[in-house]
Each structure stands twice: as C-alpha cells, then as structure tokens.
Amino acid sequence: RPRISDRAWPTLSALLPPLPRNDSRFRSERQILEAIVHIACTGQPWAQLPEVLGDSQACRVRYKRWLADGTLARLAGALLPDPDTVWQQRLAAHLTAATSR
C-alpha cells in the first residue's frame, strides 16, 4: 500500500533533483521514494525491503545521494496534505537519527 498520496506527489517530485543523463537504469522516482519512506517508517534494514518496492541496493544508493545533497531534508520539510504528514514526520525523525550517527 503506497504511503505517498497522489495529491502530495506533484509537490514532492518538484523537489527532486534531475535524473543523471547517464543513468541507463531508470527507476521510478516515486517507487524509490516509497522505498525510502518504507525504511524510515518501519526501521527495517535495506536487505528486508519488500520486492515490490524495487531493488534494495539501488534504493539505498539513491537514499545516500539524496541524504547527502539535501533532497530528503527538503522533502521532509515540504508542506504536504494531512495524510502524508504521518510518513513525513517519520522520515524527518529517521533523517535526524541518520545524521547524528
């Protein structure tokens, strides 16, 4: 069950960096963000990412990139519709924990 609502997606997608031109392994940005949100909400290790959310290694690489460039912080701070604030708060807490390690 997706956590990111269709109403929130336009706001979130506008905050994502452009895809690298040399990225031949295109993955859905929304699917990757769903995977990151899943990990943030469940606390599961990347190795236990459900298959439906994509390849755990590819999602983890994108997570690290978005963490380093500030994308995840921008997503956690965006103004989103009410149902999305639940996962957004968990993502913010996850980021706080990740950057304090």
Image: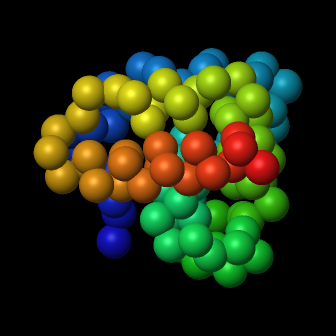
Q: What residue is at 84 percent from the left and 25 percent from the top?
A: 22
Horizontal side of 76 relative to 16 (left or right) equals: left
Q: What residue is at 70 percent from the left and 41 percent from the top?
A: 99
Whether residue 35 is visible here, answered yes or no, is: yes
Name the outermost residue toward the right.
22
Horizontal side of 65 relative to 35 (left or right) equals: right
Viewer-side residue, 28 vs 50: 50
Q: What residue is at 47 percent from the left and 44 percent from the top?
A: 92
Image location (x, y in percent) of residue 69: 71, 23
Whether residue 13 is visible here, answered yes or no, is: no
Name the outermost residue toward the front.
100
Q: What residue is at 57 percent from the left and 64 percent from the top?
A: 39
Q: Within the image, what quadrant is residue 80 found in?
A: top left
Image location (x, y in percent) of residue 68: 75, 29
Horizontal side of 17 relative to 76 (left or right) equals: right
Count of numbered circles on the image: 0
18, above or below 79, in the image: above
What is the basis of the colouring in this image? rainbow
Viewer-side residue, 24 vs 82: 82
Name the outermost residue toward the left.
82
Image location (x, y in percent) of residue 8: 27, 37
Quadrant in which the N terminus appears? bottom left
Q: Within the image, what quadrant is residue 17 found in?
A: top right
